[in-house]
Amino acid sequence: MLKSVFLSLLVFGASAAWADTTVDVSKIYGKIQFVDSFPDYKVQVVDSFPDLKVQQVDSFPDSPGKWKTVDSFPDYKIQIVDSFPDFKIQYVDSFPGPN
């Protein structure tokens, strides 16, 4: 009994490890709403080695890394977290996009 439980956990863990959970950050741009619950993505803000460099803009958020903050009708809902993010961002004044 114990062997079968261990074997099923081992197989489940291995299949979960093979699942591709990476986010294509080149598609994350547009109207962004920051939320406290039910996000599309959990994001950690860092000072170095980001997955995506983000430029906050007031208009034309039409390329990777350009985010316009909105309160309604977002393209993506983002939750800022301190650990276990889906990807990491760094705020920049120019040259946004995937790192």
Image: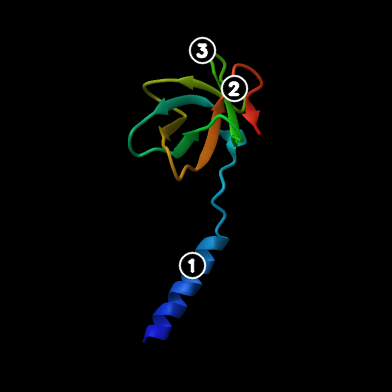
Residue 50, located in which quarter of the rendered image? Answer: top right
Residue displayed at 42% across by 83% down:
4
The residue identified by callout 2 is 62
Element carrying mark 3 = loop
Lateral position of residue 1 relative to residue 75, left or right:
left
Coordinates of residue 60 in the picture (x, y in percent): 57, 16
* Nearest to viewer (mark 3 / mark 2): 3
Nearer-the-camera pick, 13 or 40? 13
Which residue position holds label 3? 58
Residue where numbered disc 1 is placed: 13
Element under disc 2: loop
User: Image quadrant of residue 53?
Assistant: top right
Other residues around mark 3 within 10 Å, as few (<14) / some (14–19) / many (≥20): few
Amino acid on which disc 2 is placed: Asp
In what element is the residue under mark 1?
A: helix
Image coordinates for residue 65, horizontal then vertical, percent:
59, 27
Q: Residue placed farthest to the top in the image?
A: 58
Q: Choose mark 1 or mark 2, whichever is in front.
A: 1
Eye-nearest disc, 3 or 1:
1
Up the image or down, 21 lies above or below 54; here it is below
Which of disc 2 and disc 1 is earlier in sequence?
1
Asked if residue 80 lies left or right of residue 15, the reply is: left
Type of amino acid under label 1? Gly
Quadrant where the C terminus sits is top right
Q: Amino acid at mark 3?
A: Asp
The residue positioned 40% from the left and 28% from the top of the image is 34
CA gap, disc 3 and disc 2: 11 Å
User: Could you tell me residue 78's position as x and y percent?
Assistant: 43, 33
Between the C-alphas of marks 1 and 2, the distance is: 39 Å
Count neighbours of disc 2 (C-alpha within 10 A) and say few if under 14, some if 14 to 19, many if 20 or more: some
Question: Can you say whether 89 is above or below 8 in the image?
Answer: above
Marks 3 and 1: CB-CB under 8 Å? no
